[in-house]
Image (tube, helix red, strand yellow):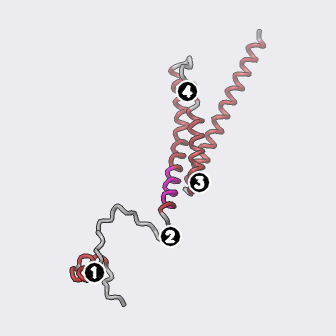
Amino acid sequence: MSQLPQNNEAFDYNPEYAKLYEEAGNEQSSLDTSDERLMPANESPIESSDEAVGKRAANLSLLFGVLSPLSLYLVVQISSYYPTGENIFLVIFASPFLNILGIWQGFVARRRGAGVRAIGGLLLNGLELCIFIGIVVLIIMFLIALSNAVSGSR
């Protein structure tokens, strides 16, 4: 059985053990290792950074999924204040752009192994992009029907 104490702190602060340790030519390690991150033995620093990137990408994907409907709400508010449509086209394309960014970040998160949040962001952004395309198609069909009704009455 080893003669060293089981408690590392007792070893560090006990001067008798410290003398024996110094006589062997070894220096005591610094107790302040707060800068170093402890990782499990089977996990490399590269894997932990990939996981962190994946979690950040999953969070961004969900954030873009939440901001996209808010941008559509902003379009409705701006169109009510400016009925002539000044600068509204810039805001209209913010929603699908945010959805495309969200889908891209979801794929990045899946590739990096973020798990369920990556799939949630992908589904949220994909569904919102389909809804946006459906709304645009309905508006275009309504405008075509309206133009045919106006041109047919002449």
Could you tell me residue 120's position as x and y percent? 58, 50
Camera-nearest label, 4 or 1:
1
- Residue topped by disc 1: 21
> Tag on residue 42?
2
Judged from the image, the secondary structure of the residue bearing numbered disc 3 is: helix
The amino acid at mark 2 is Asn
Q: Main secondary structure of the magenta part?
A: helix
Judged from the image, the secondary structure of the residue bearing numbered disc 1 is: helix
**Above-or-below relation of 53 to 74:** below
Instruction: Find the distance from the CA under tag 3 to the CA under tag 2.
Output: 22 Å
State the residue at coordinates (60%, 47%). Answer: 122
Camera-nearest label, 3 or 2:
2
The amino acid at mark 4 is Leu
Rendering quarter of residue 92: top right
In this view, the residue in front, 66 or 9, is 9
Camera-nearest label, 4 or 2:
2
Camera-nearest label, 3 or 1:
1
Q: Which residues are magenta?
A: 47-56
Which mark is first along the chain, 1 or 4? 1
Rendering quarter of residue 148: top right
Judged from the image, the secondary structure of the residue bearing numbered disc 4 is: helix
**Above-or-below relation of 154 to 25:** above
- Residue topped by disc 4: 90
Instruction: Find the distance from the CA under tag 3 to the CA under tag 4.
Output: 31 Å
Number of residue marks: 4
- Residue topped by disc 3: 110
Which mark is first along the chain, 1 or 2? 1
> Tag on residue 94?
none
Which mark is first along the chain, 4 or 3? 4
In this view, the residue in front, 87 or 132, is 87
Quadrant occupied by the N terminus:
bottom left
